[in-house]
Amino acid sequence: MEERKDYAVLRFVDQNGWSYMVNDYAKGCSLMEYIKQGIRVEKETVFNWIRQLSKQLEQYYRCGNEDAAYGYVNPYAVIITGDGMLCLLDINEPENEELLKQMKKKKLRMLFVRKERVLSQKTERSDDLYGLAKIMEFTAEKCLEPKAFTRKEERVWKRMLGKCYSSGKNAIKVLKNMQKEIGFLEKEMERPRDKVSAKKILLAILAVCIMSAVIIGGTVKKPETKAIAADQDQPETGFQEGVKEKKEVVEQKGDSPYLEMGLIYYVAWEDYVNSLDSLDKEMQETEFSDAYRVVIASLEEGSIQQQEDGLNAEDAVKNILDELEKRAEKIQMKAYLYQYPLLKVSVLEESEKWNRLTKRIGEEMIRRQTWYRWDTNGEKECEVRKYLAESYFKLGENLKAAEQYEQIRKLESNEEELEEIYEKLQLIYEEVQEYEKVWEISREAIEVLPDSERLWMNYLERYCENPEMERELCAEAVKKAIQAVPELAESEAFKQLQGKYKIVIDGENIRVGE
């Protein structure tokens, strides 16, 4: 193991929205020295490292001048202590000469500094973010097993890398967002994983359907996109090798596989071509499959369609819903497969009749929790509740909409979506004069999304427009908002608020109503 030494490091203390730097000493080794030992760690550890680093860089920026940059972010500039905590090295302290020499080597700089900056001593915050991204890639490569990330974690990881590589302005906001992204991933990993993924279930059902189709003489296509299928002149053969021509389905005995195959192609892959092709082959339940065919065709076109024989999408959805009620026991484990296409088609058109259909479908899915066993991360539940909430809102059933939004805000991880949810909740509770709830939601919103200009503006408007609110408290709220989002003070919306409520800003001194 690498010998632990005392290094001069930077520590930070947050107080009243400000960050203060403290020079200290820590016993440990550089992150580079730790990695050179070849130690493999869990991905949770790497997430924790990056969260700590992004937090400390954010604190460094908040206690320096407006354009202050750390200078040179690389694994030698990060000290890992015995308890797994990370500290930024004090690069201005001569006592750290040993590590500073390593950092200055051109070979290392080529890895962690932009090519055009390798020979330059000038540094900006964009260089810090670039170095942080390189540390992320380096630690993932050296410390994690191959394919350690799930698909969702991979997407988030790449999104954070992209923001670091492309950002220079608003570095504080980028770093705060990274901490939130990692926080969501850490919460995700704490969720119980006793459920089978939706894709595995769909593949299992599809496998059964394929076997049934082969037994009764049909052929099954592999999933393909609409674009690929459109470019093919010849029809694709089935899964079995040696099959040269499509076989005609002359007779079906027992349960037909084609209806569910058609639904799986849409739900799992949004493969409209093979979905419609499978529904065309359904020979036992033609009325049922015809109704679903109208639904899938509408989804493919993005607008409500009608069959040549006159069956329209609205009637198709109603007929399917009536039939599903009769089959509730039989399709209990596959209800989501049957209901999801109906929910998606019901939101294509803005009208009261379709909003009522969305409400009917959504309420049934919520009642039966049809996403259970198909939803490992809450995304499908969140989607269903969003559509139901929107239908309630459009139908004027605002408190019912609020009930759904209350659940959604616990599930939603997209910041822009969360902003809208908080705004809608405030609007609904204000309309029914539940002002305590308005304040509760308003305060929670800026705690959960402290970088949102929109939510801070809502918060300040509510503070300043209230004549019973002491002006000193209003001034404190303004100060808090500017500390959280410094660029807020330059926005047009804030300047209008400033004129409306006579907000005077004199350095750190803020007055309201003078």
Image (spheres, rainbow, N blue to C red):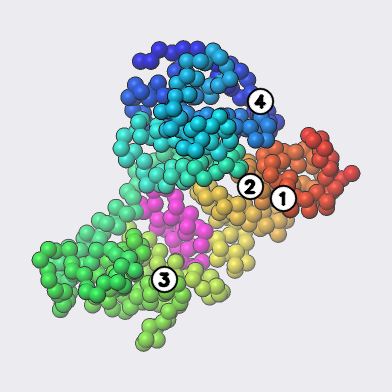
**Structural distance between the alpha carbons of marks 1 and 3:** 41 Å
What residue span does the magenta drawing correspond to? 358-387
Residue visible at 35% across and 31% down?
142
Query: Which tag is nearer the camera, tag 4 or tag 2?
Result: 4
| Amino acid of disc 1 | Ser
Query: Which tag is nearer the camera, tag 3 or tag 2?
Result: 2
Query: Which tag is nearer the camera, tag 3 or tag 4?
Result: 4
- Please report whichever mark, 4 or 2, sits nearer to the chain's N-terminal start: 4
- Please report whichever mark, 1 or 3, sits nearer to the chain's N-terminal start: 3
Task: Tell me the number on the disc at residue 452.
Answer: 2
- Please report whichever mark, 1 or 4, sits nearer to the chain's N-terminal start: 4
- Let me know if residue 151 is in the magenta part: no
Q: Are marks 4 and 2 in contact (CB under 8 Å)?
A: no
Q: Is residue 259 visible?
A: no
**Structural distance between the alpha carbons of marks 1 and 2:** 12 Å
Q: Is residue 34 visible?
A: yes
- Above-or-below relation of 54 to 261: above
**Structural distance between the alpha carbons of marks 3 and 2:** 34 Å
Q: Which residue is mark 1?
A: 491
What SS does tag 1 mark? loop
Residue visible at 33% across and 28% down?
40
Label 4 Cα neighbours within 10 Å, binned few <14 / some 14-19 / many ≥20: some
Task: Tell me the number on the disc at residue 20.
Answer: 4
